[in-house]
Amino acid sequence: MEASLQLPVSKASHSLTEFRHEVRAFIQKELDAGSFQPDCDSWLAGFSREWSMKMGEKGWVGMTFPKEYGGQGESNLKRYVVTEEMLAAGAPVAAHWIADRQTGPLLLKYGTEYQKQTFLPRICKGEVYFSIGLSEPNAGSDLANIHTKAVKESDEWLLNGSKIWTSGAHLQDYMIVLCRTEKQTEKKHEGLSQFIVDLRAKGVSIRPITLMTGEHHFNEVFFENVRLSDEMIVGELGEGWKQGMAELAFERSGPERFLSTYPLLEEMITVLKQRADADSTYAYTEIGKLVATLVTLRRMSFSIAQLLEEDQPASLVASLVKDLGNQFENTIIETARMLIESEPSTHSEQQYERLLAKAMLHSPGFTLRGGTTEILRSIVGKGLGL
Amino acid sequence: MITIERMLIDTTEKLFKQTCTKELINDSENGIFPKIFWNELDSMGITTIGVPEDCDGSGFTKLDAFAVLKIAGSFAAPIPLAESIIANWQYVELGLPLPNTKQTISMINEDVDLQQHSEGWIINGTFNRVPFTQWADELVSPVKTTTGKWYLLTIPLNLTTTAPDSNIAGESRNKVICQNTSINSSQVIAMTPEHAAQFIHETLLGRTMMMAGALQQILTMSIHHAKERQQFGRPIGKFQAIKQQLAVLTGLATSANVIADSAATATVDNIQFQTEVKIAKTYISQSISKAVPIAHQIHAAIGFTHEHPLHQYTRRLWSWRDEYGSEAFWAKQIGENVLSSSKSLWNQL
Ligand SMILES: Cc1cc2nc3c(=O)[nH]c(=O)nc-3n(C[C@H](O)[C@H](O)[C@H](O)COP(=O)(O)OP(=O)(O)OC[C@H]3O[C@@H](n4cnc5c(N)ncnc54)[C@H](O)[C@@H]3O)c2cc1C
């Protein structure tokens, strides 16, 4: 097998398991107190400042960041446990998700001391949120085709252009914007830079794009002569593409790539247990297949967390986790339909039907966000030397 | 030569194209009844297709009516058209005059209790997920009594309470509750079990035709998008991955249309109508879980927005596949029938 496909078998240590129990107990206490309703796709749609700050107090946001920047200096594996437990419970973690997952690590790796001091402690408190400013109307899969540009004028940069499909920009504070700082040439990936942009700055306007579900999640964000100082450049000018690509392994291998519909699976099992007429052989088989896939994906994702902990390359296997994980998320929906006859409805009295409706309505996004399935598969193909 | 049936299809299609707009569909989700559209269909006689002209219908056959319902599905028409047409058929077949009120129908009713008394009947019970009750005057439904007799009930909706609900396409699917609802004798008509079964299967086929139409539409939209949307300097339809997906979607939509048309044809020569309908509903419902993801994948982010009309079809397909029994429900019946027969499978087909 290709060396890049060789994944180490990583088992959780005793202390990690104990930590997991601690997180689980915390979530249970909150559930009992009614602080949240378990929901599908909660890392994208469950925005709760209160919840994020609560997690911040526990030290569970930015927990891998060094202590000097407000973090806990903990391992990726511990972070893995927190994210997995939150997603399995369907907790509203969307507010801080991007900051915790990618902005923080990006700034730690490439940011200036000023940037680290300014943003990281507040990220860790769960009170400052970031969005991803990549896609543009004509730059989706072909991301390098972006046209938003920053031009230097005396000692400031002027940012002009727009970003589209920006999750949560209307609720978040800052955006990491990928833009052109040099004229586009044949080599589209060159001359791109990353800036930190305050979403409330003068010249930034945010237009909602309603989802097919009727929810406001996406936005189109316009920049009109937005003034940026040199201090807002992340890393090196012109290195934006490379820096952005480095985030991808984190972005694609996490448990959010296979647990978006997990609350539905849990609820399905609750309902099946209560039903005397459950067609047992069929139900057992189907649930068994889901469990086998789930456990495999968890092992795989956990192994990648281990690789990332050791600073080893993992982008190829991360793509595999996302692809397999997205398929699993959809299989849960289809299995639910087969096992429990119902008609999904977003305002049903039954939690099961509500979760099913939410999962179904959000499902088109699973295989698009963070790189479409087609793009992931072509990355895998390239990785195999095809 | 252009047949009269062809003309019916062409004019209907034209009307839907002009009138059943994205805005009209969105408005209907906000509770606005598309009155002008409905009146136009009514005045064209579309609501009484399959009812003979000497019974005040517009003639044609049930086959033609099902072809019209496929068009309705291919435009995501948010109106109780299938419900009205099928209710009208029941009236005529039971020898009753066509009503000039608006009907919706139900084939899902749990434990409805019917009691006869000197002046009429008392109904107690619930009808679940009844389409568009707020836009209808009466609910028409076959009901089986505890003694095993079938009746076709016409229940004035103003005598009932409704609990609002909707499917994930935002089409109302309300709960109709009858609590000591008193209706007169002319609103309770005895029917044979065969007739009740016919009603149920026609209702099922109505949804099936609409699914076939909507599938055809998402294929058309996906092909269009694949030709229009450019990435990496060329239309995305030029990428092998997209070509492969489109080929699969084409297979799904085409086969769905074949089995839907075949089931509709069985209304005319009546060979194995009920089996054919169950097969069509099962086949098409199960193909939705492959077809819808492909259409969304090809459209990507733009197709995930409310602005783009794709969701008006995909949300309907997700809903309709489970209405009146999902593929799990009907496949189980088909399977049970096959396994309980002493004949080989081949001899049962
Ligand atoms: C829920 C959700 C949240 C998102 N959040 C954000 C966000 O916060 N910030 C942000 O910047 N973006 C965000 N996006 C945008 C996302 O990154 C894009 O949707 C994605 O990159 C695809 O771009 P596109 O939608 O323009 O599709 P297109 O690139 O137009 O693709 C259309 C279809 O063509 C296929 N295709 C394209 N090129 C090729 C090729 N070379 N070979 C084979 N197939 C190809 C695609 O796979 C897809 O099926 C989000 C998207 C979703 C759905």
Image: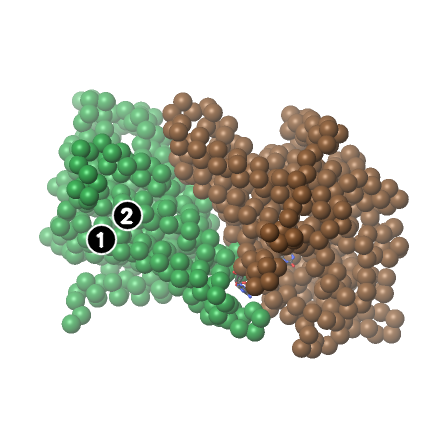
Q: Residue furthest left?
A: B54
B164 relative position to B307: left or right: left
How many numbered marks, from 0 up? Answer: 2
Labels 1 and 2 touching (C-beta < 8 A) = yes
x and y, in percent, of residue A74 in the image: 80, 39
- Tell me which residue sits at (21%, 56%) in the image: B64
Q: As shown in the figure, which amino acid type bears the numbered disc 2?
A: Ala
Which chain is the one coloured brown? A
User: How many neighbours does mark 2 have within 10 angstroms: few (below 14), some (14-19), or many (20 or more)?
Assistant: many
- Tell me which residue sits at (58%, 42%) in the image: A297
x and y, in percent, of residue B169 in the image: 44, 48
Quickly name the residue at label 2. B280
B74 relative position to A206: left or right: left
**Does the closest atom of ligand 1 sit within 8 Å of the Cβ of label 1?**
no
Q: As shown in the figure, which amino acid type bears the numbered disc 1?
A: Ser
- Tell me which residue sits at (21%, 65%) in the image: B6
Quickly name the residue at label 1. B262
Q: Which mark is residue B124?
A: none
Q: Is residue B192 visible?
A: yes
- Tell me which residue sits at (24%, 39%) in the image: B200
User: How many neighbours does mark 1 have within 10 angstroms: few (below 14), some (14-19), or many (20 or more)?
Assistant: some
- Element on which disc 1 rests: helix
Q: Chain of mark 2?
A: B
Q: Residue furthest front?
A: A1
Closer to the N terminus: mark 1 or mark 2? 1
**Does the closest atom of ligand 1 sit within 8 Å of the Cβ of label 2?**
no
Task: Name the one closer to the observer, A210 or B315.
Answer: B315
Which chain is the one coloured green? B
x and y, in percent, of residue B135 in the image: 35, 46
